[in-house]
Amino acid sequence: MYMDKLMAVLQRLHELLDKHRIGYIVVGSLADYLLGVPVARLRDIDVLISARDAEKVGTLTSAEPGISTVVPMGYRESSRIRGLYGRLSLASVTVDILASIYLRYQGKWIPISYENLLPCTLEMKLTGNIAVRIPCPEIQLVADKALGRLERAETLASLINRDGCRAKLSACKFLGLLGNT
């Protein structure tokens, strides 16, 4: 039942971002779920946008009914991730907005921007007229390892071994930074 609500909010988010010409990639737990990984706690939507679109997020919340800012866009840092971050609420669902992030992986800070991740994505058609972009399994595998989600990483590794990735990984220039996944 909650998945229906999450998909309805994703549909609305898609419409809002499209209306304001903000490109996005669904990342995090929802991306894992869409790739076929069982996710025990799927409560929010995480999207990666371009840094140049980060300032539009404030406009989005002030111009559109039903969406509010919980955490304004700003630089945040933890031991595993750093970059621009904001949090919105849309129909009581949390939407985390990331832009120009760095993910700590194998002792290195890996830059992950909308622009460098876009060639490494897959299009997933969902209900209604919505198609979203998600990172290919190899990228999600790295993110899950970096964030300590090892069970999800194992599941993704099995999916990669079975299905491979339909994205053109040769276009994914920053994969070389990742080393051996």
Image (tube, rainbow, N blue to C red):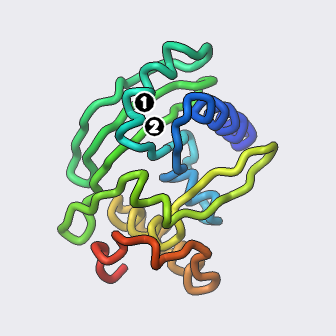
Q: Is residue 60 left or right of residue 58?
A: right
Task: Tell me residue 68's x, y (percent).
Answer: 50, 18
Task: Tell me residue 50's x, y (percent).
Answer: 41, 43
Question: In the rendered image, which quarter contains the C terminus?
Answer: bottom left
Q: Nearer the viewer, residue 40 or 64?
A: 64
Q: Amino acid under label 1? A: Arg
Q: CA distance from mark 2 to mark 1?
A: 5 Å
Task: Tell me residue 159's x, y (percent).
Answer: 59, 78
Question: In the rendered image, which quarter contains the N terminus?
Answer: top right
- For disc 1, the neighbor class at 10 Å (few under 14, some 14 to 19, many from 20) is many
Q: Label 2: which residue? A: 96
Query: Which labelled disc corresponds to residue 87?
Result: 1
Q: Are marks 2 and 1 in contact (CB under 8 Å)?
A: yes
At horizontal 54% and vertical 75% (from top left) the residue drawn is: 168
At horizontal 54% and vertical 41% (from top left) the residue drawn is: 45
Could you say whether the residue bearing mark 2 is in a helix, strand or loop? strand
Q: How many marks?
A: 2
Quadrant of res 66: top right
Quadrant of res 147: bottom left
Task: Tell me residue 4's x, y (percent).
Answer: 75, 40
